[in-house]
Image (tube, rainbow, N blue to C red):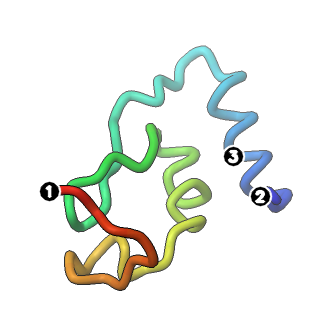
């Protein structure tokens, strides 16, 4: 479920012709998460636990392939 701030950030990102969600964001293990821009980065990355972004030894409930 998106919060209002997440929905607004993603809406602005899609609606603003001067914004290009131009970079890919990865977790601390190098696993692709999503595409972000300056306007939506905080909202999109807030969906992930902080350690997923900073600690490559974070706990995962499923096996992760090399």
Which residue corresponds to mark 1? 66
| Whether label 1 touches label 3, CB < 8 Å | no
Residue 45 located left or right of residue 27? right
Residue 53 in percent (x, y) is at 34, 70
- Quadrant in the picture for residue 3: bottom right
Which residue corresponds to mark 3? 9
Rendered residue at 79%/56% (across/down)? 2
Secondary structure beneath label 3:
helix
How many numbered marks are there?
3
Secondary structure beneath label 2:
helix
The C terminus lies in which quarter of the figure? bottom left
Residue 24 in percent (x, y) is at 34, 39
The N terminus lies in which quarter of the figure? bottom right
| Whether label 2 touches label 3, CB < 8 Å | yes
Residue 26 located left or right of residue 47? left
Rendered residue at 24%/81% (across/down)? 55
Q: Nearer the viewer, residue 2 or 56?
A: 56
Q: CA distance from mark 2 to mark 1?
A: 35 Å
Q: CA distance from mark 2 to mark 3?
A: 6 Å
Which mark, residue 5? 2
- Quadrant in the picture for residue 28: bottom left
| Closer to the eye: label 2 or 1 | 1
Residue 40's place in the image compared with 42, above or below, is above
Residue 51's place in the image compared with 47, above or below, is below
Rendered residue at 54%/19% (across/down)? 18
Mark 2 vs 1, N-terminal side: 2
Q: Nearer the viewer, residue 8 or 52?
A: 52
Residue at the far left in the pictured view: 66
Q: CA distance from mark 1 to mark 3?
A: 33 Å
Residue 34 in percent (x, y) is at 45, 43
- Quadrant in the picture for residue 29: bottom left
């Amino acid at each position: 479920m998106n919060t209002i701030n997440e929905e607004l950030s993603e809406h602005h990102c899609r609606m603003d012709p001067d914004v290009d969600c131009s970079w890919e964001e990865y977790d601390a293990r190098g696993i692709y998460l999503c595409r972000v821009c300056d306007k939506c980065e905080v909202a999109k990355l807030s969906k992930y636990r902080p350690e997923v972004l900073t600690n490559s030894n974070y706990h995962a409930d499923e096996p992760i392939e090399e």
